[in-house]
Image (spheres, rainbow, N blue to C red):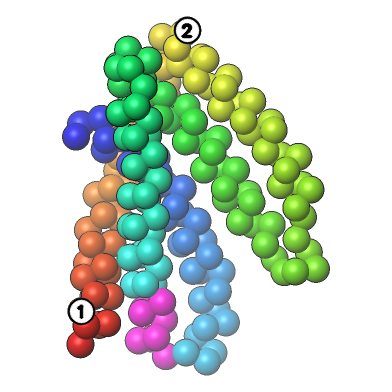
Amino acid sequence: MNELAPVYGIISLFVYSWTIVWFFWKLNGWLVYLNLGEIGMILIYSLATNLLESLFVLSVPVLIGMVLPAHWYLDRFIARSTAWLLPGLSYLVFAAYQFEGRSKFHQSLIIQVGVPVLSLMVIFIFASIKWQRASRLLEDIADRATIYIFVFLPLSVLSLMIVILRNIL
């Protein structure tokens, strides 16, 4: 559990930050034609969705750790997970930003950026294996991202309970 928290912190840093940026970007327009209750429900549904998304993303490094031998991955779980999550989640945010509309979808750009991102993942993982300093740096970044758990996890669990209760009743 101690090693899952920093990795989940990295995941929540990307997932929740993207949603908060998206929410505040649209808030000005929503204030014109939605009431505060409807805006609050959009935020609640977004936070509940983010919880499920972040748990799904967290399951990937956990499954990798279960499949690979312990000395390959689990011995440095935080550093290795952070090594591929940082570029991977950055790429997903970039790819999501490319969906501005059908006429402006840049599929070739997404594919062209994918190769350098995969290369960056390999470099980060190699650096975390070979250099203790790089491994410590990745672990420190993940450790500092743990603060996001204390803010977003309770809000997301509460949001998920509200969504479940709202849809049952």
**Side (left or right) of 164 relative to 64:** left
- Please say whether residue 145 is one of the residues in the magenta stretch: no
Q: Is 141 or 15 nearer to us in this picture?
A: 15
Q: Residue 115 placed where, x, y %?
A: 69, 33
Q: Is 79 or 164 nearer to us in this picture?
A: 164
Q: Amino acid at mark 2?
A: Lys
Q: Residue at x 51, y 14 (%)?
A: 127
User: Which residue corresponds to mark 1?
Assistant: 165
Crowd around label 1: few <14 · some 14–19 · many ≥20 (10 Å): few
Q: Residue 149 placed where, x, y %?
A: 28, 47
Element class at badge 2 = helix
Residue 90 appears in the picture as rendered: yes
Q: Residue at x 50, y 56 (%)?
A: 18
Q: Residue at x 73, y 43 (%)?
A: 111
Give residue 155's quadrant in the image.
bottom left
Q: Amino acid at mark 1?
A: Leu
Q: Residue 131 placed where, x, y %?
A: 46, 8
Q: Which residues are magenta?
A: 35-42
Instruction: Examine the rendered structure and indicate whether residue 18 appears above or below residue 137.
Output: below
Element class at badge 1 = helix
User: Which residue corresponds to mark 2?
Assistant: 130
